[in-house]
Image (cartoon, grey):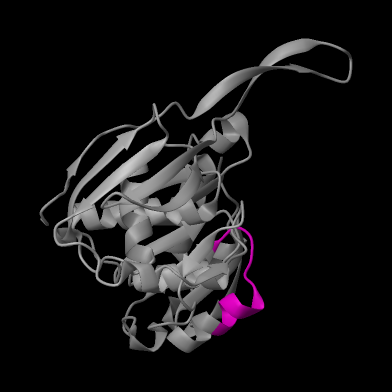
Amino acid sequence: MPRRPHMTNASAPLTREVEAMDERGRLSLISIPAERPLTVYVDKRELVTLMTLGAAPEALTLGYLRNQRLVASIDEVESITVDWDVDAVAVKTVSGIAGIEERTARKVVTTGCGQGSVFGGLMDEIDRIVLPPDARLRQSVLYRVVDTVRTYQSIYKQAGSVHGCALFTADGELLYFIEDVGRHNAVDSIAGMMWLDGLTGEDKVFYTTGRLTSEMVIKGAQMGIPFLLSRSGTTQMGHMVAERLCMTLLARCTGKHFLALTGKERLIMETHLADVLRVA
């Protein structure tokens, strides 16, 4: 197990109730996601403000720093302290981040919910990433993943308006399920959890309810994950990056249906399962 930073455990309430009136004039209370800002300070330097549910703010912060390539190892982080009274998280590193001003000067606005941004070029360091060529995913495991997400008691079912991301083993066992107002926050939270638990990605499967843009594909690759599944689809650049990485990209994953777009050679097809009726 890696050395964990000193951290708070400051999960916030994920929903709140508001009054709504329906088409017949009837009043009722409904649940909505409790979106809130979280400003990240690294060594007392303001870095970014993330809009989040606040389900796992420490893991989100760590995963954000990881996927932005600002820290290369969890050992570089001494502490992560979240204070919802001021909507901020303070990160203290062991030795500082070399050249942080230059590294965060260039921003790329992404297609993330709420207009996400990444520091530096989107394609930086991509060619250095090598995903495991011998990783395989059985069609039956793919169906297990999709069905697990379908039946999961999620915030989306209660309140809507959120994206979910999940990490599974190669056998389809659920490891993490995170929801947030944007899918980028959800994947960053999972990246942080993987670091905290000392997990690597070469034998993992990643699922998202949102689309697989280039940034989502790059983050999956940085986490070392060869299989990315989406209930939605992908973009042209997401497809291009996946092909360049030889990553297996699957879109429109609902029920028994899916579309394998790249990395088809990694799939172990069991086509007879597509004709088996799902038992509720």
**Picture coordinates of residue 7 (x, y %)?**
21, 40
Do we see residue 20 in this rendering? yes
Q: Is residue 237 magenta?
A: yes
Verify whether residue 269 appears in magenta. no
Identified at 34% across, 60% down, the residue is 65
In the rendered image, which quarter is residue 13 located in?
Answer: top left
Quarter of the picture holding the N terminus? bottom left
> Could you tell me residue 141's position as x and y percent?
42, 61
Quadrant in which the C terminus is drawn: top right
Which residue is rendered at x = 38% and y = 73% of the image?
Answer: 102
The residue sitting at 62% across, 70% down in the picture is 234
Between residue 116 and residue 181, name the one nearer to us. Answer: 116
User: Residue sitting at 61 percent across and 62 percent down?
Assistant: 211
The magenta span reads 230-240
Q: In this view, does 28 lie to the left or right of 215?
A: right
**Whole-percent x and y of residue 15?**
53, 26
